[in-house]
Image (cartoon, rainbow, N blue to C red):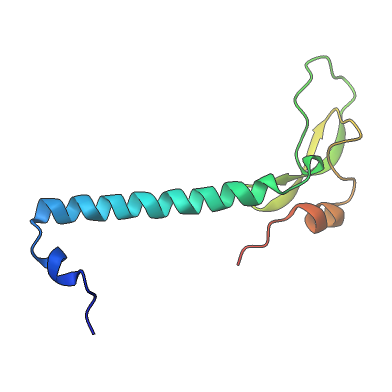
C-alpha cells in the first residue's frame, strides 16, 4: 500500500521536501499548543493565584495549580475568597489536568 501523494513527494527537490516538512511540524506544534491552552481555560479562576498586592503584609498559604508541572503547590501571599484552596487534595480534585 502506498499513499496517493507519495509519488508527487518523491519528485520534490530536497529543498522543497524540507520546506514541506517544516510546514507540517509547525502545524503539529500549533495544534498541540492550542489544545493545551483550551484545557487550561476550562479551569476555575480559584485554581490560580491572585495578582500580587505590594501592600500585602499578612501572608498565608494556600494551594494553587501550576500548569507547567501539573501539580498543586503551596504559595504564600495575600488571598481573597476567590483564589486558592486550603487543602492540597481539593486543589488536585478541581484543578489538576488529566494527562492522557
Q: In which quarter of the image is the C terminus?
A: bottom right
Residue at horizontal 70 percent and vertical 53 percent from the top: 71
**In the rendered image, the vertical position of residue 63 relative to residue 18, given as above or below:** above
Give the residue at the far front of this rendering: 4
Q: In which quarter of the image is residue 6?
A: bottom left
The answer to whether residue 59 shows anywhere in this view is: yes
Give the residue at the far bottom of this rendering: 1
Q: In which quarter of the image is the N terminus?
A: bottom left
Judge from the rendering whether residue 100 lies leftward or rightward of residue 93; answer left or right.
Answer: left
Residue 96 versus residue 74: which sits nearer the camera? 96
Judge from the rendering whether residue 62 lies leftward or rightward of residue 72; answer left or right.
Answer: right
The answer to whether residue 68 shows anywhere in this view is: no
In the rendered picture of this protein, how many numbered marks are placed on residues? 0
Residue at horizontal 23 percent and vertical 54 percent from the top: 20
Where does residue 54 sit, x and y in percent of width and height?
Answer: 78, 16
Judge from the rendering whether residue 8 lies leftward or rightward of residue 49; answer left or right.
Answer: left
Give the residue at the far top of this rendering: 55
Residue at horizontal 64 percent and vertical 52 percent from the top: 39
Where does residue 88 sit, x and y in percent of width and height?
Answer: 83, 53
**In the rendered image, the vertical position of residue 61 relative to residue 65, given as above or below:** above
Residue 96 versus residue 3: which sits nearer the camera? 3
**In the rendered image, the vertical position of residue 93 relative to residue 44, given as above or below:** below
Residue at horizontal 25 percent and vertical 55 percent from the top: 21
Residue 66 versus residue 20: which sits nearer the camera? 20
Where does residue 19 sit, x and y in percent of width and height?
Answer: 20, 50
Amino acid at each position: 500500500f502506498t499513499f496517493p501523494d507519495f509519488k508527487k513527494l518523491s519528485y520534490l527537490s530536497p529543498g522543497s521536501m524540507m520546506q514541506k516538512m517544516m510546514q507540517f511540524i509547525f502545524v503539529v506544534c500549533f495544534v498541540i499548543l492550542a489544545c493545551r491552552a483550551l484545557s487550561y481555560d476550562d479551569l476555575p479562576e480559584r485554581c490560580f493565584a491572585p495578582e500580587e498586592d505590594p501592600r500585602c503584609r499578612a501572608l498565608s498559604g494556600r494551594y494553587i495549580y501550576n500548569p507547567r508541572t501539573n501539580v498543586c503547590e503551596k504559595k504564600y501571599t495575600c488571598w481573597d475568597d476567590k483564589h486558592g484552596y486550603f487543602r492540597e487534595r481539593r486543589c488536585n480534585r478541581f484543578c489538576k489536568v488529566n494527562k492522557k
